[in-house]
Each structure stands twice: as structure tokens, then as C-alpha cells.
């Protein structure tokens, strides 16, 4: 492979960054930034599991097939000319087009063509970056055959001509991006930007220009509409009369405009604006949070921890259902339902308080998984008189907070809001998944017990956080 190319080549590995942010993919290819390496344990785990998955696929393909590992684009072309069954770690190069590609496998079809194939932990090939990557390989090969995706649950998916439009869009936009020497203008997205390695590079510039999309609820098209209406900065929006703002995409109706103006004002003042009464249900509150592992390789998440905080809400009031392995999933589900029935009997007017829709969605998915939609406890949990109460709803409906994200940790960790701190500041949902996978792999009993204790401590802090949020809301806004 020629490592002294004078121009950046278009490569399908850029598809994920391209799908997220034009500036990110430009900086990856043309930026000259010295960034400190980011230790992302979850990303490292995903990479490790992805490599394991690839090796399993390779072992399966070796059974009954002649497999050769390519060492260069020239070697790949030679192996293809010889008609070997399978080429592993193929290297494709088209200097005239400016393309390079590295499919995991090239598999020779009975008609003599080679099908590109990749091993993916994903459970579907519908993701944009997967469509682009496999579509790109098909284009480089001039293949009429569909590309193959070996999915994380052991199944296969196929990508054919339907991926051509998104692949062509990727190539066209990448050519434009790589042809310019200026960073592309982009909008801020809190969830995407915060997870990006260029966050510290981009965020100060967004703040300096008072980029409107820094505000919660102001997405790119809403920011475009505000600028078209003559409002280009957060200061200008903070000074605006919501009644005089025109309807624009993703920001229409007086209430939404008023929220946007309040959000701009809170950005500077740090004040909380209450725009509606906060209504919390009466009853005996049990705070509820789950931890699940999406990296099971089965296509279904495994809830390894169903956690609860019961009255009197102290450290010793934490209760839970735990399962060590995914093959204990059904037992864990049954134990969770039994626990709910215990609370239902103990607390006549039970409220199961959680934050966001994740818990309800997971219960519904489990009921479907095990054919238990008509189970009495499931009907109780998901019916019209459900005890489940999503605490995010009154926050979003009633309050404007001086935050760029309205996640539980955003609200609870803020020193001027709930001011509740997790014992392990580095912990989080992805952290929990990493720790649980370490727990699964650990053979030392003492270390295994310590990992479990750390995960339980994190989940306990999650339910204590929703309890502290409840108290904060009752004290200030009910």
C-alpha cells in the first residue's frame, strides 16, 4: 500500500464519522490537531468483541474453504486472479477514483465474482455506515452480487443495489469535503459532540459565536430558521419576545418559542424557569432503574440488574435482582415480576419511579420475548393504571433548566440544582456494561465479587439520584 499519497483517499471506514458530522470527518482526514488519546473503555470493549466475532466468522469460513490472507492491494488482485475461495483482510485500491477499502472478506461466488463481506456486531445491516461501507466495496469491485454482513447474532444480511444512493452520496460529499482546506461549518449537538474526540477543539468556537444549537431543544433546522428570522446568537434569542417569533421548522407554537427564549436566558443567568405546574403522583414511591448488556451476541439485551430503592431510601434500602449470565435471563425476569408483586402487596398505592422511557420499553420487550403480554403482573405494569412513573416527563413538561442536556446526571450532578454526586464519578451506563463484561470474564472469585459490588453501587446511586430528584422537585416546584 502506498503510504505517501498526496491526497486523502476516500475510504469506507470514514462512513461512521461522515454520518455523524462533516467537520469530524474533515478533521480526521485533513486536520492537524494533536489530541490526547481518549481512553474509552466501552469503545475498547466493542472493538475487542468485534475482533472476536470476526475470528469466529473466519474459523467458520475455513471449514471446507481455502482461505488466503492478503498482504497488499497487489496481493489481493493476484489472489482474485487465481480464483481462491476466500480472501481474508483484502486490500482494495483504485488510484484513479481515489478509493481505498479493506473488506474483512472477499468470498468467491460460483459465477466467479467476489462478494465483499464484513463481520459486524450490529444486529441489522440497516445502519447508514454499514450500508455505505458494503456498498462502497461493491462499487470498487464492480460487483453485481449483494455484499454479505455477518451480524452479531449469528445471522447474515445482504446489501445490494438499494445501498447505491447512500453510497454515491457519501462519495460525492467526501470528495467535496476533502477538496477544501477550511473546516466545514456545522451545528452543535450535545450528545454527539460530547462523545467526540474533537469536543475540546470545537466547543470554544461554538461558545464564542453563541451558536444557537448550544441550547437544549434548538436543533440544526430550528437554528437555521431562527437565523433566517434575524436571530443569530443566544443573546438575541434571550432578548426576543416569543410572541413575535415566526413559526419555523421544529420551533412553532407559542409554548415552544417561549421555552426557547427561556432556555437562552437560562444559558446566561443559570436560572430555572417554571413554565407549568409540576405534578407528582401520590403513593408509596419505590425508585427503579435497570442495567442491561447489549453486547450479548444473541440479538437481545440481557438485563443483569433490576434495582430498587424502597422506603426509607437510605443506603440499606437498596434491593435488587441480579443474574450472572445471559442464560439466566428468564429467571431474572421472573424474579423481577415476583419482586414487583411483593411491592404491590406491601405498598397499596405503589409508584415505581424511573427516569426516561427505558424501563417501560424494556419491560414491554421482555413480555414480548417470553410471550407474556397477558401476564397479570405485566398487565399491571403496562396498563392504564400502571405504577410506572417516568420522572423525566414532569421535568421536560414543566421546567427550563440551565443545561445543554436533560439526562439524569446532567440534572442531579449540577451544583445549583439537585447536587447529588455518584460515589464513582466515572461510572455510567456504558461503564456498567464494561464492568459487567469484565465480571463475566473474571475467574478470580475475589475480583469477581468486587466487580459486582461496584456495579451494584452504581445502580444504587442511580436510584438514590431519582429519589433526590423527587425531593428537589417537591421542595421547589410542586
Image (spheres, rainbow, N blue to C red):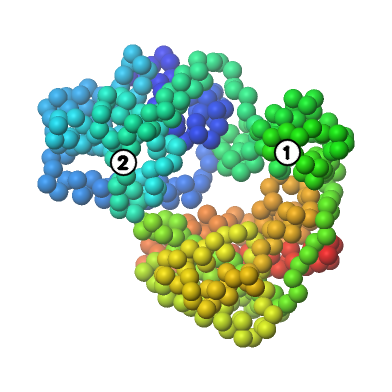
Residue sitting at x 75%, y 30%: 226
Residue 211 at x, y percent in the picture: 73, 31
Q: Work out whether mark 1 precedes mark 2 in sequence or the reverse, and give the earlier one.
A: 2
Separation of residues labelled 1 and 2 (CA atoms): 39 Å
Residue 272 at x, y percent in the picture: 83, 51
Residue sitting at x 48%, y 70%: 373
The crowd level at tag 1 (other Cα within 10 Å; few <14, some 14-19, many 20+) is many
Residue sitting at x 61%, y 38%: 193
Residue where numbered disc 2 is placed: 158
Count of all numbered marks drawn on residues in the image: 2
Residue where numbered disc 1 is placed: 251
Q: Is residue 274 left or right of residue 392?
A: right
Query: Is 444 above or below relative to 77?
Result: below
Residue 241 at x, y percent in the picture: 88, 36
Residue sitting at x 38%, y 43%: 125
Residue positioned most to the bottom: 345
Depth check: give the residue in front, 72 or 246.
246
Tell me the element at label 2: strand
The crowd level at tag 2 (other Cα within 10 Å; few <14, some 14-19, many 20+) is some
Depth check: give the residue in front, 360 or 414.
360
Depth check: give the residue in front, 150 or 314.
150
Residue 137 at x, y percent in the picture: 32, 29
Query: Is 417 above or below relative to 66?
Result: below
Q: Quadrant of residue 447?
A: bottom left
Q: Quadrant of residue 389?
A: bottom right
Asked if residue 313 can be seen in this view, the reply is: no
Query: Is 461 above or below relative to 223?
Result: below
Tell me the element at label 1: loop
Q: Considering the image in quadrants, where does the C terminus appear?
A: bottom right
Asked if residue 177 can be seen in this view, the reply is: yes
Q: Quadrant of residue 117?
A: top left
Q: Which mark is residue 69?
A: none
Amino acid at each position: 500500500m502506498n503510504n505517501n499519497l498526496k491526497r486523502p483517499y476516500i475510504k469506507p471506514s470514514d462512513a461512521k464519522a461522515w454520518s455523524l458530522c462533516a467537520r469530524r470527518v474533515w478533521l480526521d482526514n485533513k486536520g492537524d490537531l494533536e489530541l490526547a488519546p481518549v481512553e474509552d473503555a466501552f469503545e475498547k470493549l466493542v472493538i475487542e468483541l468485534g475482533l472476536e466475532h470476526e475470528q469466529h466468522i473466519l474459523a467458520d469460513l475455513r471449514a471446507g474453504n481455502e482461505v488466503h490472507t492478503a498482504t497488499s492491494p497487489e496481493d489481493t488482485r493476484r489472489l482474485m486472479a487465481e480464483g481462491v475461495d476466500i480472501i481474508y483482510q483484502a486490500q482494495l485500491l483504485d488510484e484513479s477514483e481515489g478509493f481505498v477499502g479493506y473488506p474483512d472478506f472477499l468470498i468467491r461466488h460460483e459465477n466467479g465474482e467476489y462478494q465483499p463481506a464484513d463481520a459486524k456486531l450490529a444486529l441489522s445491516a440497516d445502519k447508514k455506515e454499514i450500508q455505505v461501507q458494503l456498498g462502497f466495496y461493491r462499487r470498487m469491485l464492480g460487483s453485481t452480487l449483494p455484499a454479505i454482513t455477518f451480524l452479531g447474532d449469528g445471522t447474515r444480511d445482504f446489501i445490494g443495489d438499494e445501498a447505491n444512493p447512500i453510497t454515491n452520496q457519501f462519495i460525492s460529499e467526501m470528495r467535496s469535503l476533502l477538496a477544501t482546506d477550511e473546516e466545514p461549518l456545522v451545528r452543535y449537538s450535545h450528545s454527539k459532540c460530547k462523545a467526540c474526540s474533537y469536543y475540546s477543539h470545537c466547543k470554544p468556537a461554538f461558545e464564542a459565536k453563541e451558536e444557537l444549537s448550544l441550547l437544549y431543544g434548538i436543533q440544526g433546522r430550528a437554528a437555521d430558521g431562527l437565523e433566517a428570522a434575524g436571530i443569530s446568537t443566544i443573546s438575541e434569542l434571550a432578548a426576543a419576545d416569543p410572541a413575535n417569533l415566526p413559526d419555523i421548522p421544529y420551533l412553532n407554537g407559542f409554548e415552544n418559542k417561549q421555552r426557547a427564549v427561556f432556555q437562552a436566558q437560562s444559558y446566561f443567568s443559570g436560572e430555572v424557569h417554571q413554565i407549568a405546574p409540576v405534578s407528582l403522583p401520590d403513593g408509596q414511591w419505590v425508585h427503579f432503574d435497570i442495567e442491561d448488556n447489549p453486547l450479548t451476541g444473541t440479538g437481545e439485551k440481557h438485563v443483569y440488574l433490576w434495582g430498587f430503592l424502597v422506603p426509607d431510601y437510605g443506603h440499606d434500602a437498596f434491593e435488587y435482582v441480579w443474574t450472572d449470565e445471559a442464560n439466566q435471563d428468564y429467571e431474572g425476569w421472573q424474579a423481577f415480576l415476583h419482586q414487583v408483586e411483593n411491592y404491590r402487596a406491601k405498598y397499596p398505592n405503589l409508584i415505581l419511579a424511573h427516569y426516561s422511557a427505558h424501563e417501560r420499553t424494556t419491560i414491554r420487550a421482555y413480555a414480548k420475548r417470553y410471550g407474556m403480554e397477558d401476564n397479570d403482573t405485566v398487565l399491571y405494569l403496562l396498563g392504564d393504571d400502571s405504577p410506572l412513573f417516568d420522572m423525566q416527563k414532569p421535568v421536560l413538561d414543566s421546567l427550563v433548566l440551565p443545561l445543554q442536556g436533560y439526562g439524569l446526571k446532567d440534572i442531579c450532578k449540577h451544583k445549583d440544582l439537585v447536587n447529588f454526586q455518584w460515589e464513582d464519578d466515572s461510572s455510567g451506563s456504558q461503564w456498567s456494561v464494561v464492568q459487567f463484561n469484565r465480571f463475566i470474564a473474571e475467574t478470580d472469585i475475589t475480583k469477581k465479587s468486587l466487580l459486582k459490588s461496584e456495579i451494584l453501587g452504581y445502580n444504587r446511586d442511580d436510584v438514590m439520584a431519582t429519589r433526590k430528584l423527587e425531593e428537589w422537585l417537591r421542595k421547589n416546584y410542586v
